[in-house]
Image (tube, coloured by chain):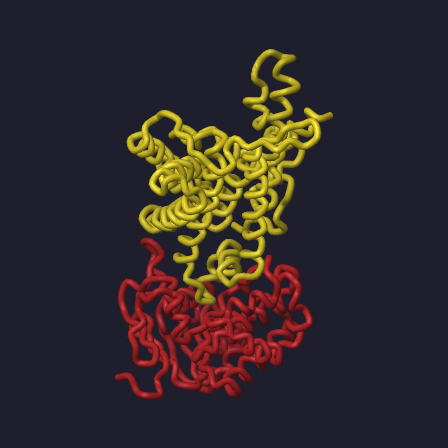
Chain colours: A red, B yellow
Amino acid sequence: MLESSTLLSVQNIETYYGPVSAVCGVSLVVEQGAIVTVLGANGAGKTTVLKTIAGLMFPAKGMVHFEGENITGIEPDKIVRLGIAHVPEGREVFPLLSTEENLRLGSLNNQLSRLDVVYEYFPILQKHRKLSAGFLSGGQQQMLAIGRALMQTPRLIMFDEPSLGLSPKLVHEISEIITRINTEQSVSILLVEQNAKMALQVAQYGYILEQGRVVMENTCERLSASTDVKEFYLGMKEAGVRGQRRWKRRKTWR
Amino acid sequence: MDTFIQLFLSGISAGCVYGLVAMGFVLIYKSTEVVNFSQGDLVMLGAFFAVTFSQWLNGNYWLAVVFTVMAMACLGYGVERILFRRLMGEPPFSVLMVTIGLGFVLRAVAGMIWGHDPQSMSTPYSDARLAWGDFLLPVRDLVVIFGTLILSVILFIFFKSSRIGLTMQAVSQNQFAAYCVGIPVKRVLALTWALSATIAGVAGILLVPIKSAYPQLGLLLGIKAFAAAIVGGFGSLPGALMGGLLIGVLEEMTKFYIDPVLEFGVSEFSAYILLLVILLIRPQGLITSMQRKKV
């Protein structure tokens, strides 16, 4: 089942927060070198999928394979060492440490040569390298979180809503950087987003999550063309033409 | 004036011990958000270890110091591994109750092993005094001050420039992000406990020549050091040390100047008066860490 080009494969995972099921049976595959996106509204279970892959949450069922190796239920620090970097939601930085210390913590063997690579992507971080990360602006903190993930020389980077709370211009910049990292560093990318427009432009393949289930998956071109995605995720209205009320229209997958 | 200086110095010496214990409180609190109420009893254990090792080693003080420090580090690591790792994710209040319980257990066990009579230990400097001009200074007080100073400098360098120190800071500032960048958070927490117990052990070693070792040694010490930690802002190690020094000096001063006048022991609770005053006029403590706790 696992082909040689498959980097990450998630099979039918179910994850619970106490008695509440957040993810009930999600499967997805990230091919070597691909950018894959997971779209969905609030509470669809996107973040939980990432946390389960990263080892921060235990799945009740299902398996996660990385490079053919079963990594289900392994400690998070070992998963990072295998080459999966996780850029968490809401730019989690170490606020009292300096920018450079934050980056140094990212590198696994204290390889400081990686710093130059990061500074090349984000020159602004070099400018503020002595500044406490808590004083950086939101966009800079997001860059720092991405830079910290780059320090790990990962095979796969998982982004959790990198566009959250950023200006349209910064969203554009971040999406360009994600593409650059993908091609230049030959890193595969799993991008979780609410900003469907940006995500569908950047990625090649997409999954749509709703209430903990994958309701649709396809190439991003086809997804962008689908009427459901257009209406519910890209906010283009067509329904009015036929006089249908939006709240009466049912999604095809329900 | 001479008495004042003498009182000041012995106050500083007592305050150093409070400060060391308070630093232990702060270390554990910052990384696990739990106040370890058995910190004082760890000091007691350190004191007993020092006595015992020095007996086994025929009074070789320095070797006893090294052994005590190592034993305390192992103890702290073990306590986290056996007890507190199982409680990860439990409400802080339950963990706090466990630390109080641990204190009871440690006191009882120490009583069973070593008995309830104070035990002293001989040190190379036990009864030495330094005569300087008019006033005499017990060397043991100076040893406490210099010991604390050296330990503080070591800790400062450790947190500033060592990789483990950096990861410890990272874990205390943002545990989730620490997981994300691949820091083995659980191991780092165990090491933090080991460090905290080591500091308590050093406090015990420094305290033995002054107070000897007995099972109840840590009880009052722990409470006063807790007050010191709050006075210092409960978020920074220098703050904790400063709070300790303040309380130590205050106690010595009230003992000499106020107790005889009022004819009862104000010095016994002067620490708590200071705590109340600080909480009223500066509730955030003397030194505040820049960041408010995120909920």
Residue extending furthest toward the right: B1
Relative image position of residue B71 (x, y in whole percent)? 37, 47
| Residue at the image position 43 percent from the left and 57 percent from the top | B188
Left or right of residue B96: residue A70 = left
Left or right of residue B217: residue B266 = right
**Residue B100, can we see it?**
yes
B259 or A247, nearer to the observer: B259
Relative image position of residue B280 (x, y in whole percent)? 64, 31
Relative image position of residue B115 (x, y in whole percent)? 32, 28
A204 or B118, nearer to the observer: B118
Relative image position of residue B48 (x, y in whole percent)? 38, 36
Q: Quadrant of the C terminus of chain A?
A: bottom left
| Picture quadrant of residue B65 | top left
In the rendered image of this protein, does residue B257 appear above or below residue B31? above
| Picture quadrant of residue B49 | top left
| Residue at the image position 56 percent from the left and 42 percent from the top | B234
In the rendered image of this protein, does residue A97 appear above or below residue B31? below
Q: Quadrant of the N terminus of chain A?
A: bottom left
- Label count reads 0
| Residue at the image position 47 percent from the left and 67 percent from the top | B181
**Residue A244, can we see it?**
no
Left or right of residue A209: residue B27 = right
